[in-house]
């Protein structure tokens, strides 16, 4: 009788949590953020200043708040292109109410409430009528901003009270703005919601295979409806912050916000096809986008160049994973 050789154990590099952490997308984003921070510090003598760094946070927090909710929506396999238009409509309705003497609590309630209603409207069209979310939100993007132009035309609303302006211009402590604190709190809440609750697991399941999730007992339509409402809520909050920071309302407010929010989400490692992504990645991506745009602003780079950069970055981060998978599949076994 011959001894049977013991089977060899083939080590799996993913068994090492330290290695998998080092090789993660979030670790790469941290390195990129540090490199951009160093470049900015050498490129402009005004960058390494406490008040300049505080201004940096105003540069991305409003869009990043939207990106937190957008991340969950994209992980679930849907998208909302109307977020900037929701901001415009919410801001317009707040300004309209201001003309009739609405106080700060009422203005905040109108802004957030408008976001909820718009998000619920998008959710109903997608989950109730089974329409594609990209088509629906392109339509509501024009609808919501069109209503703002009908109400305001080429005019603007001004004269917001100082107590309302604090939401967009106030500081909690020294140079730590209220917007930054709110964003960090929301980031923690969304992290817990996505990564530590059954709701988050349902979001991942829907994004990977919504039919299988449906047969597993997941209420797919209700979950997606909630996600659209959350995106509307965050758009309403962003409308309050942006309107308070600018101190005025115009129908063209927040143009391009949807592009930057989606860029933050995809750059953060969220798969545009759904089913994968993390809140930590989105937070780091928001910081990177803020660092880049703020650094370019300190160098007096025109806004159109920043738009070109954002669009190019979105194309690159979507194309790279696809190209990498194609290259890996071509490699010999």
Image (cartoon, grey):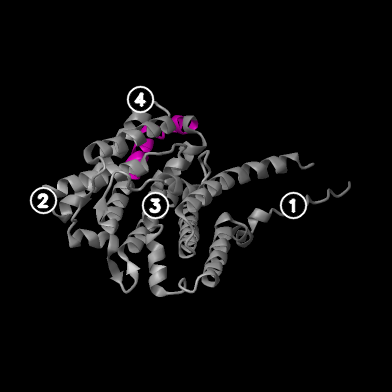
Q: CA distance from mark 4 to mark 1?
A: 51 Å
| Disc ID at residue 129 | 4
Q: Main secondary structure of the magenta part?
A: helix
Q: Which mark is residue 63?
A: 3
Question: Which numbered marker is on residue 101?
Answer: 2
Q: Residue at x 36, y 58 (%)?
A: 183
Q: Is residue 230 magenta?
A: yes
Q: Mark 2 and mark 1 in contact (Cβ < 8 Å)?
A: no
Does 168 sit left or right of 28 as displayed?
left
Q: Check residue 96 in the rendering and tell me which mark sits there, or answer none.
A: none
| Disc 1 target residue | 10
Question: Up-down: is 130 above or below 181?
Answer: above
Looking at the picture, how far across and down is residue 297, in whole percent? Answer: 46, 61
Is residue 179 shown left or right of residue 304?
left
Q: Nearer the viewer, mark 4 or mark 1?
A: 4
Does label 3 or label 2 sit earlier along the sequence?
Answer: 3
Task: Identify the mark nearer the N-term, 4 or 2.
Answer: 2
Q: Nearer the viewer, mark 4 or mark 3?
A: 3
Q: Is residue 11 left or right of residue 209?
A: right
> In this picture, which residue range is highlighted in magenta?
212-231
Counting residues from the start of the chain, the first of labels 4 and 3 encountered is: 3
Q: Is residue 40 above or below residue 227?
A: below
**Quadrant of the frame with the C terminus:** top right
């Amino acid at each position: 009788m011959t001894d049977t050789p013991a089977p060899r154990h083939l080590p799996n590099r993913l068994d090492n949590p330290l290695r998998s952490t080092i090789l993660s997308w979030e670790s790469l984003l941290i390195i990129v953020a540090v490199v951009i921070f160093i470049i900015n510090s050498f490129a402009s003598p005004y960058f390494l200043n406490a008040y300049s760094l505080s201004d940096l946070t105003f540069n991305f927090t409003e869009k990043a708040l939207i990106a937190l909710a957008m991340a969950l929506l994209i992980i679930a396999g849907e998208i909302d292109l109307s977020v900037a238009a929701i901001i415009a409509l919410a801001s317009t309705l707040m300004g309209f109410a201001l003309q009739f003497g609405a106080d700060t609590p009422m203005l905040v309630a109108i802004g957030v409430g408008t976001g909820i209603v718009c998000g619920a409207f998008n959710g109903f069209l997608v989950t109730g009528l089974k329409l594609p979310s990209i088509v629906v939100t392109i339509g509501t993007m024009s609808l919501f901003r069109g209503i703002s132009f009908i109400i305001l035309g080429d005019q603007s609303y001004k004269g917001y009270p100082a107590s309302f302006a604090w939401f967009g211009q106030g500081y909690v402590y020294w140079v730590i703005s209220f917007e930054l604190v709110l964003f960090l709190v929301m980031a923690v809440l969304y992290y817990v919601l996505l990564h530590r609750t059954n709701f988050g697991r349902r979001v991942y399941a829907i994004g990977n295979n919504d039919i299988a999730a449906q047969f597993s007992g997941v209420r797919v339509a209700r979950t997606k409806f909630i996600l659209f409402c959350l995106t509307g809520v965050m758009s309403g909050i962003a409308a309050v912050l942006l309107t308070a920071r600018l101190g005025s309302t115009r129908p063209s407010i927040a143009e391009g916000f949807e592009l930057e929010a989606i860029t933050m989400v995809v750059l953060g490692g969220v798969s545009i096809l759904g089913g994968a992504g993390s809140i930590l990645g989105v937070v780091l991506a928001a910081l990177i986008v803020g660092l880049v745009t703020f650094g370019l602003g300190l160098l007096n780079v025109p806004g159109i160049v920043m738009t070109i950069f954002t669009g190019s970055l979105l194309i690159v981060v979507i194309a790279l994973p696809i190209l990498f998978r194609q290259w890996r599949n071509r490699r010999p076994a």
